[in-house]
Each structure stands twice: as structure tokens, then as C-alpha cells.
Amino acid sequence: MSSDSQAQDRGRFDVTFWGVRGSIAAPGPTTARYGGDTLCLELRCDDQHILIDMGSGARRLGRGLMDDVPRAGHEITILLSHLHTDHVIGFPFFGPLFDSRSRLTIIGDASRPVSTRDGLARLMSEPLFPVPLEEVPASLEFIDVAPGDSVNLGPVVVRTCALNHPGGAIGFRVEHRDRVLTHISDTEHVGDEPDPTLVAMCRDADVACYDAMFVEGVNYERHCGWGHSTWQAAVRLAEAAGVRRLVAVHHAPEHDDETLDRVARDMERAYPGALVAAEGLVIDVLSGELARSGG
Ligand SMILES: [Zn+2]
Ligand SMILES: [Zn+2]
């Protein structure tokens, strides 16, 4: 059996981190190793191409995708946790949006007063952006789901839940080939006991990405109520849910590489295998192996 057909039999479920920062992009020499772009994850689940959030990291991802367009165009599902700018600012700069062959399905939160379509239309309108949403060449379909609902994407099941964040946000649990990846950002923990809804969402997750923007005892206490969590709360949740690999995301813009090295060391000590996401990190959810993307 060739290695190609072995790979086919085994299937595919991997995630590439194109942006890992929260709040605002923070490029520069002090953040070069972990990266300055805001959240954007790319999942490949066999033939399903799924993105989670469209922060500034979506620009580079989109550029790479336009270098390699399938004959029928890109067919992509975009899961949006919420519409704060750090999670959507890359959307108007996402290459496939400007290719008429692209078919993009955008899944957002139905519980908010502004729909996902209307929110993105506001972002892409004068005087904020020159090209209105309704004029982009790609075919767009918007599906807003109530937190708690599930969506089937071919063989992939995406479950959602409400998060504790100003204005609301939704978390995602992506199930494929008996493996699980969760994305819980943006959210703030309440007290020391993990939220039972989040424990259920992250139950036995192979990869659990979590908003670890702050550090308890360092800067969390000054930011209570801002809707973000800590790596310590991430560890408590991972312990309660039996997470295999915990991944910190939504790094504070002021956390430079040295600070994140310290967080990575402390978190790994508290929860072996845990890591702080860096731009270019690739995790094979099926094997658990780590790699770096050249993109
Ligand atoms: Zn955010
Ligand atoms: Zn937010």
C-alpha cells in the first residue's frame, strides 16, 4: 500500500493556526515567534474545509488559498464565534471572497440582535470599507444558529454553546472520525469551578483551544468582567473535561514572546502536553502530532 492510500484510509482531521492573538493585531519583533495576527484557525476534515474566526490571520490564509484554487473554486464553511473586530477584521481581506467561483457558508450566532450578515455588512460599508458586502463576487450563504444547536457538514458535526462574553459569543465542538476539537473563545470563567456547559462541550476533546488571554495573579484581576479567561481556568476546565491536549489562544496583545514562553512553561507543568498556540502551528487531531506550516 502506498503512503498516499494509507493517508486516504486514515482520513484527515488537522488544524492550522493562522492567527492566535486577541483584541488587536500586535506584530513586531517582540511577538515574532508566537505571531501578531488575530484569531483564525483552518480545519481540514477530509473534504470539509472549515475556518474558525476571521481575524487578521485570515488575510495570509486567503492569499495562500488563491495560489491554489480548485477547478470548481473554494468551498469553505466559516464558523464565527462573534463579530468583535479581532474575529472578523480579516474577512474583507480574505482572497476567496473576491473570486466568483468561491462558495462560502458563514455560520454565526442567532441569539444576538444583529445578524451575522448585517454585522459583516456594517464592517464592509462606507466609511469603514470601500467594497460593500453585497458586491463581493463570491457566493455567500449565512446560517445563524441558536447557541446549543448543532450543524452537520458532511461527516462533520459542529456543536455550539453560549459563552460568557460582553455582547455574547459561541463556542464550537467539531467532531470528526471519532475525534474532537473544541474552540472556546471569547469567554470568562466564573469562580473556580468550571462551567458544566463548557465541561460537557470539551468532554474528552483531543484538542481544546481556550481563551487564555490573562494570567491569574498577574493581570486577570484588573480585567474582571472583560469577558476573557486565564490559562489557570483553562487547566481547571481541561482537568474536569478530560482534555487530551489543551491549547491557549487569544493571547493579549501586550504579551510578548518571553511572557508567552513563561505561560507555556507554567501551563505545561500544570497540565502536561498543554501548549500556547503560535502562528503556523499545525496539529494533526487524528495522531496528535505537531508540525509547523510553511505558509
Ligand atoms: Zn476577541
Ligand atoms: Zn470578543
Image: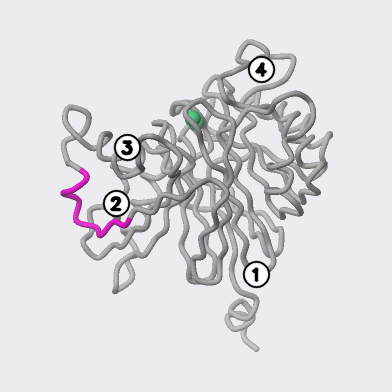
Q: Is residue 276 positioned above or below 207 on the image?
A: above
Question: Which amino acid type corresponds to the residue marked 1 in the rendered image?
Answer: Arg
Find the distance from the CA under tag 2 to the CA under tag 3: 20 Å
Of discs 1 and 3, which sits in the foreground?
A: 3
Disc number placed over residue 95 in the picture, else none: 2
Of discs 4 and 3, which sits in the foreground?
A: 3
Can you give x and y, in whole percent of width and height, for residue 214 in the image?
64, 23
Q: Nearer the viewer, residue 225 or 265?
A: 225
Of discs 2 and 3, which sits in the foreground?
A: 3
Q: Earlier in the sequence, mark 1 or mark 3?
A: 3
Q: Nearer the viewer, residue 260 or 196?
A: 196
Q: Is 64 on the left-hand or right-hand side of 282?
A: left
Q: Earlier in the sequence, mark 1 or mark 4?
A: 1
Which residue position holds label 1? Answer: 177
Q: Earlier in the sequence, mark 1 or mark 2?
A: 2
Which residue position holds label 4? Answer: 220
Instruction: Tell me which residue sits at (72%, 48%) in the image.
Output: 200
Find the distance from the CA under tag 1 to the CA under tag 3: 34 Å
Instruction: Tell me which residue sits at (35%, 41%) in the image.
Output: 115
Of discs 2 and 4, which sits in the foreground?
A: 4
How many numbered markers are drawn? Answer: 4
Q: Are marks 2 and 4 in contact (CB under 8 Å)?
A: no
